[in-house]
Amino acid sequence: MTVLINQQTVELNQREQAKLLNLLPYWGLSLNQDQAIGPAFDKHTINIHCSHSYLIEQTQVYLQHTGLTLMQNQQQSPMYDVQFFNNHDYPISVQAGTRNMTYNLKPLHPGSATTVQRFIHKNLWLPPGMEPYTVIIDASYQSRSAEWLAYLFMQQMSDSLLPDLKHISFPVYQYLVKKVLTPLNESFAKTQFFEQSEPDLPLSPQPKQQQAVEKPAPHKKQVSSQKGSHFGHKQTNQHTINPFKNGSDSDHGGGETINPFKRTHKQQTKPFNPFKKKR
């Protein structure tokens, strides 16, 4: 099969062609009757309310190959209201429509992809519902927010359900990214290479205050997140558990780290002599 990309011919075998047709909707692309690959969302617009204009500009860079145009028209109701919160409990949350339903999404951590299906949109999926959408992003993940928004906007514009990608391996996927996607949008293609160097972000925003543990430190039992917790979930009210502390005292105190090997300084008291005569 021969396809046209920027008026340049690219040769694909039959298996590569079948896999490419499943990938194109995820990339915001389509194949026309002339076997030319082009934008799938040409002449479509999304009105966004966001106080960070640079974020809209960066998201537009990721979407330039799709034909989708982002705009900020204060005179119209926005389809998306993007907000940044400090110390938000999740990396990204989405409120769909007016039902007051909040969906806490689970973005994929860099380098932890197991399948192309999860990796292609970084495990971010727009929840069902009607616009407007309110997107809340923890401020510590601001450097990745433009990429995340690009995925949500492409899913919003898709006319049908996205196809299953379980049959596509990473080597084949990387080959098609380099062969097809890179010539159309190099900036977006860089987000689709699994071995790329991504921003050095923490797995979870670190607590604002941490108390130093005295050495030698006692055996510590670390409080872990609950099973099935989201990536980036911040634990609150964390404290060090002292294995030598009585259970009845576990709920008291001001969160001070207790060192069982530290000597306590008691107030000096006069010894009591039971044989001493009272005056």
Image: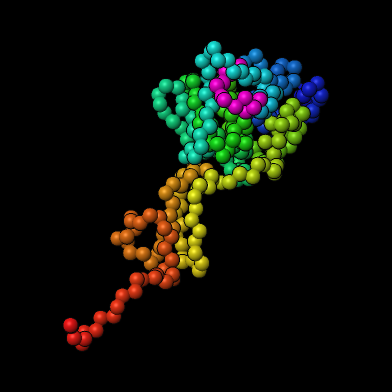
Q: Name the residue nearer the viewer: 212 or 118.
A: 212
Residue 160 visible in the shown view: no
Q: Name the residue nearer the viewer: 17 or 175.
A: 175
Residue that protrudes farthest toward the right in the picture:
8
* Residue 242 vertical placement versus 232 (above, below): below
Percent of width and height locating residue 276: 21, 86
Q: For the N terminus, give its image quadrant.
A: top right
Q: Residue at x 41, y 28 (%)?
A: 101
Q: Quadrant location of residue 52?
A: top right
Q: For the C terminus, give its image quadrant.
A: bottom left
Percent of width and height locating residue 167: 62, 37
Q: Which residues are magenta?
A: 45-57
Residue that protrudes farthest toward the bottom in the picture:
275
Q: Quadrant location of residue 55?
A: top right
Q: Is residue 47 magenta?
A: yes
Q: Is residue 60 magenta?
A: no
Q: Residue at x 36, y 64 (%)?
A: 245
Percent of width and height locating residue 63: 66, 25
Q: Residue at x 53, y 47 (%)?
A: 206
Q: Residue at x 71, y 31 (%)?
A: 187
Q: Name the residue nearer the viewer: 266 or 189.
A: 266
Give the colour scheme shown.
rainbow
Q: Quadrant location of residue 178?
A: top right
Residue that protrudes farthest toward the top in the picture:
75
Residue 32 visible in the shown view: yes
Percent of width and height locating residue 69: 64, 18
Q: Left or right: where does residue 214 sit relative to residue 150?
A: left
